[in-house]
Image (cartoon, grey):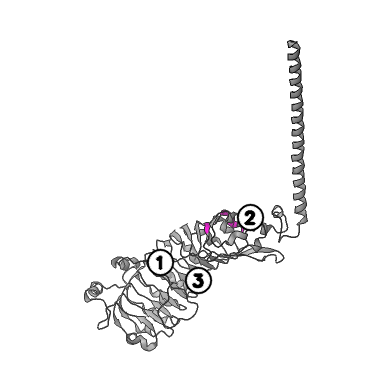
Amino acid sequence: MSSFSLSSIACHVFSLLLTFLLVLSCLFSNFSLAVAAKRSSSHVYVSHHRHSHRGHHNHPHPAAASDDSNPRLYQAFLALQAWKHVIYSDPYNITTNWVGPSVCDYMGVYCSPALDDPKIRVVSGIDLNHRDIAGFLPEEFGLLSDLALIHLNSNRFCGILPQSMANLTLLFELDLSNNRFVGPFPTVVLSLPTLSYLDLRYNEFEGPLPPELFSKKLDAIFVNNNRLTSVIPATLGGSSASVVVFANNNFGGCLPPSIVNFANTLEELLLINTSLSGCLPQEVGFLYKLRVLDVSYNKLVGPIPYSLAGLSHLEQLNLAHNKLTGIVPAGVCCLPNLANFTFSYNYFCEEEGTCQNLTSKGIAFDESHNCFPEKPYQRTQKECNAILEHPVDCFEYPCDSGGASASAPSIAAVPAATPLSSPPSAAAPTYT
């Protein structure tokens, strides 16, 4: 009886186990079929969705963005999505709508007909000025090959510029000012064949300026307020720039005579606080279109070049905070368009003719802290003698000698003058 019971129980257990295994097998089989069916359904849906959007590239599904309807907008989509992923702060939520492939609807992104095929639209401009965005420019930025304009003024973009920007062969304006870009001067911009406007001011670029910069057909060159060093390249040639701003860098050396190569185009030259030394070259007076010349806060020595009397279009002249000596020539004070003449904080000892009464000509001026006898607010006799007893002959001394013999106290950075957009009134220069 006992033996029979044990045998019956064993058979019963085996039967239950077999049944359980069969149930599991069925469940697994059904699950596998369901997964396969779902995958098959998804594939059919995506394929159908892709075909249903051909010819409607303005609003494609992401899965359809790689079709042949507009591959250039798809490239832009890839670039802008890569850029969005390396934006770490966007306080005004500018990139919130950078979702999906309709890139022409992205805030700050502008589309227009392609230059080589007006029937298709391309991303031709990016304007994110004053958005306080933090991030960097990814290597995919070079996919935006139809860009003609990039304005990223006043943000917190950092890092170095990607070499892929060399692909932006249609770029006309590049404004990266007031950001946190670093590294050597970004030579990638030199490879942009159509670039006309370059604004790199208020960043952290360092090292020398490449001479090739001044061989490009640029209308405006702004490199002020960086950490650029070395000297202003001796070979300044071929540039078509009307505005050049070097201010608030640490170049040192002298202003090279090759500055005359800018004569046919240059209207504004700002060299404020660039550690320039030596004499101001006579060639500056050959820049006959010049309207603004500011060489203040440097270590310039010697007299004012008489050639400046030929700058008939000059409106603003600032020579302040140097170690210039000699007379203030009447030829400069009689310039027909001169509205503001600042020559304070030098060591001038005589004013010729009209220079003694600039007020009568309606010219705003500052002559303080010089060595003019019987004029108020001048230097002490001791200060004047220390410099005037060692005159500098600019024709005998090579460029660096004058600057080397005339040391100047360190000067805090001062703002670069805002380039003029209209003739100034007879008031003190405005700085920003």
Distance between the Cα atoms at labels 1 and 3? Answer: 19 Å
Q: Is residue 364 left or right of residue 213?
A: left
Residue type beneath disc 3: Ala
Question: In which image quadrant can residue 137 be found?
Answer: bottom right
Q: Which numbered mark, 1 or 2, is in the foreground of this view? A: 2
Q: Is residue 196 left or right of residue 22?
A: left
Which region shows up in magenta?
A: 134-145
Residue toward you, 115 or 378: 378
Distance between the Cα atoms at labels 1 and 2? Answer: 38 Å
**8 up-or-down from 271: above or below:** above
Q: Position of residue 407 (x, y in %)?
A: 29, 66
**208 up-or-down from 425: above or below:** above
Q: Position of residue 56 (x, y in %)?
A: 74, 60
What is the quadrant of the C terminus in the image?
bottom left
User: Is tag 3's residue or tag 2's residue first in the polypeptide sequence?
Assistant: 2
Q: Which numbered mark, 1 or 3, is in the foreground of this view? A: 1
Q: Residue furthest bottom?
A: 360
Q: Position of residue 67 (x, y in %)?
A: 72, 54
State whether residue 238 appears in this view: no
Q: Is residue 281 left or right of residue 54?
A: left
State whether residue 260 appears in this view: yes
Residue 241, numbered label: 3
Question: In which image quadrant can residue 93 be found?
Answer: bottom right
Magenta stretch contains residue 93 = no
| Disc 1 target residue | 248
User: Is tag 1's residue or tag 3's residue first in the polypeptide sequence?
Assistant: 3
User: Is tag 1's residue or tag 2's residue first in the polypeptide sequence?
Assistant: 2
Residue type beneath disc 1: Asn
| Disc 2 target residue | 78
